[in-house]
Amino acid sequence: MYFEQFYLGCLAHASYLLACEGEAVVVDPQRDVELYLKAAAEQGATIRHIFETHLHADFVSGHRELAARTGAKIYMGAQSGATFEHVPVSDGFELKFGKAWMSVLETPGHTPESICLVVTDAEESSAPWAVLTGDTLFIGDVGRPDLSPRHTPAQLAGLLYDSLHTKLMTLPDSVLVYPAHGAGSLCGKNMRAERSSTIGTERLTNYALQIKSREEFIRQLTSNLPARPEYFAKDAEINRTGAAALSELPPLRSLSPSELEGMLKAGEIALDVRPMDEFAAGHVPGSVNIALGGQFASWAATVLGLASHPVLIAETDAQIEEARIRLARVGIEELDGYLAGGLAAWKQSGQVLATVAQIGAQDLEQLLRAGKVQVLDVRRESEWDAGHVEGAAWWPLDNFRVSAPEIDHEVPLAVHCKGGYRSMIAASLLQRAGFRNVFNLIGGFDAWQQANLPFVTAVTASAK
């Protein structure tokens, strides 16, 4: 049997292709499906089956396009409520492809319709070889239990406990574990960096599997959940009905600097995808920077929303194309065009540039001691609790979709995150909201700690 994991780092998403004797299966496909078609062709196989382990909330799946292009059947958990043609599957459903087969385990908890797929390769052994766990079981973690509009987090957490202990943990320790997400995904709390594991390893090392009672499991799983982005529910609905093929997206409109200027005055959003240092050195006033180098699409969906239709600003056509595909992967499809010629054309037309001042940790500490600057931390709550600059204000970047922080516009404001990526997004949003004296901390809180500068934790701060 042929097996391949496709890992999409920007979304921390893993999908899979399995093939045996010319028949192939794809599990949890990403939005752009060419890679599966190419891999199957290289193996001399035809994609006949597509499984979704659940209705994904953090990205838009390519299951419908892949099915349309191959004639493959789509299989989903019986509780999915999917409105497109599919095969609803429950416990005991088995699919054979060549000398291999998949057996379905219904594992509600992350979502009501979640399933896991136990894979057996008869060419090697009659015993199970691996289990594709979707978002039920991660490496070092389990799926968050708050993504269903019909169930409370406590109800889902209870179902997840049952799914883990009565189904997944009954598999042999040697069975390999391949989840749908890795470190960085918001579908869990704290996944490890590895991209596979075994049932035995997770039994011994996964914190959630060490919790003995169902009640304590529910309590821990529903406490301190990471913020759930607004777009999660919308992506799940898109996946319930099935997204259009990427080829159906209309071509992007080319815009002149004067056209973009008029659109910005009318309230349009310009999304600058260049690296943050280039953005800091000069950018279109009022534009928002989300650099392609990080978790670009997730942050675009979080802070702009799926209903946004930004104008793209980039240096090359390749960057424009990459940005468009990555935005489509999370459901942002209706873009209003791109700035022809990028920032160079903007400058050549005589338009003004804005900048974001950058500051080092030592210089910031001196200004802070002199009372000449305020500090804004835009990291998530767990990061803030673990350590933060004393006296800093806290407003996580996830909250910027709702509103900018209530901070004095006139006092210089230094923004930081862990390493600088999120803080530059925040700085650009603050400038757009009217803040005029914004600094970005170079290297973020990591640089602050590396400089051995003082900080407090949530515990020490509360004790003062």
Image (cartoon, helix red, strand yellow):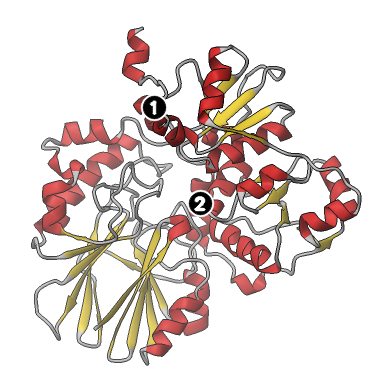
Image side of residue 148 versus residue 237, left or right: left
Give whichever of 69, 187 is nearer the camera. Answer: 187
Residue 129 appears in view: yes
- Determine whether the residue tagged by mark 1 lies in a helix, strand or loop: loop
Q: What is the count of numbered marks?
A: 2
The residue located at (35%, 36%) in the rendering is: 152
What is the three-letter code of the residue carrying label 1? Asn
Could you say which disc has been placed on residue 47 in the image? Answer: none
Q: Position of residue 41 (x, y in %)?
A: 42, 89
For residue 387, which quarter of the picture?
A: top left
Give whichever of 191, 369 is nearer the camera. Answer: 369
Question: Counting residues from the N terminus, which is met first, the one under dot 2 or under dot 1?
Answer: 2
Image side of residue 337 versus residue 248, left or right: right
In this figure, which residue is indicated by the disc labeled 1?
452
Image side of residue 140 versus residue 23, left or right: left
Foreground mark, 2 or 1? 1
The residue located at (20%, 51%) in the rendering is: 163
Give whichever of 180, 286 is nearer the camera. Answer: 286
For residue 421, which quarter of the picture?
A: top right
Question: Mark 1: few, some, or many residues within 10 Å (few <14, many ≥20)?
Answer: few
User: In this view, which residue lies farthest toward the top?
Assistant: 464
- Quadrant containing the N terminus is bottom left
The residue located at (78%, 45%) in the rendering is: 284
Q: Position of residue 71 (x, y in %)?
A: 46, 83
Query: Disc 2 to disc 1, how far (Cα)?
Result: 28 Å
Q: Position of residue 60 (x, y in %)?
A: 51, 60
In this figure, which residue is indicated by the disc labeled 2?
295
Give whichever of 4, 438 is nearer the camera. Answer: 438
Q: Position of residue 264 (x, y in %)?
A: 82, 44
What is the three-letter code of the residue carrying label 2? Gln
For residue 335, which quarter of the picture?
A: bottom right
Image side of residue 266 versus residue 338, left or right: right
